[in-house]
Image: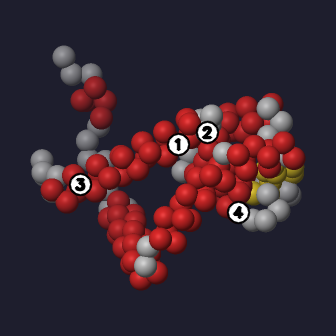
């Protein structure tokens, strides 16, 4: 088996710590991770506080089941509403209560992120984004070549 390089260990550590920092921020704001990601997607999508449901799934990386479960809770709390947008498509809107709630919660995360990038030299921000995108593209391309060469059931049922 290949060893994880020192650089990948550091990268994985930073990714884990970043995820933990967002989790902690969400908890401090009284949000579950999934609720935060949904509200973040809606707030970041456009000025009208509307976001297609498929875009929430795409941006958040959450499973459809997790998104639907969180949407149900947020709807029950009066934070958002769903409307039909043609065919099977739905749009998600913040209610007035939801806009106020988002302003007290997810807007703080967005403000913090914007302030951090604003404090960096523009060239550093550009380079950071370029490198992150290049890594993602390369990983996705390499992952397309993965094949399942073993039957996992054999490993799970060994004595």
Alpha-carbon span between mark 1 and mark 4: 21 Å
Q: Can residue 76 be seen at all in this image of the molecule?
A: yes
Eyeballing the image, is 97 above or below 154?
Answer: below
Q: Give the mark count.
A: 4
Q: N-terminal of the two: label 3 or label 1?
A: 3
Between 99 and 130, the residue placed more toward the observer is 99
Rendered residue at 65%/49% (across/down): 106
Q: Nearer the viewer, mark 3 or mark 1?
A: 1
The percent position of residue 108, horizontal first and vertical second, equals 62, 52
Circle 2 sits on which residue? 29
Q: Is residue 31 left or right of residue 159?
A: right
Helix, strand or loop under label 1: helix
Secondary element at image label 2 = loop
- Nearest to viewer (mark 3 / mark 2): 2
Are the residues tagged 3 and 1 within 8 Å (C-beta)?
no
How far, Cα to Cα, is label 3 from label 2? 29 Å
- Rendered residue at 75%/36% (across/down): 74
Image marks 1 and 4: residues in contact by CB distance under 8 Å: no
Q: Looking at the image, can residue 38 be seen?
A: no
Q: Which mark, by number, is residue 45?
A: 4
Q: Is residue 99 above or below residue 65?
A: below
Q: Does label 3 or label 4 sit earlier along the sequence?
A: 3
| Crowd around label 4: few <14 · some 14–19 · many ≥20 (10 Å) | some
Chain-order first, disc 1 or disc 4 = 1
């Amino acid at each position: 088996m290949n060893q994880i390089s020192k650089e990948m260990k550091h990268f994985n550590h930073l990714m884990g710590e970043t995820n933990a920092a967002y989790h902690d921020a969400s908890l401090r704001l009284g949000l579950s991770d999934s609720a935060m990601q949904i509200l973040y997607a809606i707030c970041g999508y456009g000025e009208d506080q509307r976001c297609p449901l498929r875009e929430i799934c795409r941006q958040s990386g959450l499973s459809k089941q997790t998104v639907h479960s969180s949407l149900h809770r947020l709807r029950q709390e009066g934070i958002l509403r769903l409307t039909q947008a043609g065919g099977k498509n739905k749009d998600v809107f913040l209610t007035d209560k939801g806009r106020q709630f988002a302003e007290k919660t997810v807007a703080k995360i967005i403000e913090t992120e914007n302030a951090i990038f604003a404090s960096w030299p523009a060239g550093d921000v550009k380079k950071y984004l370029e490198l992150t995108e290049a890594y993602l593209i390369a990983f996705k391309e390499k992952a397309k070549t993965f094949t399942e060469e073993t039957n996992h059931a054999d490993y799970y049922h060994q004595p």
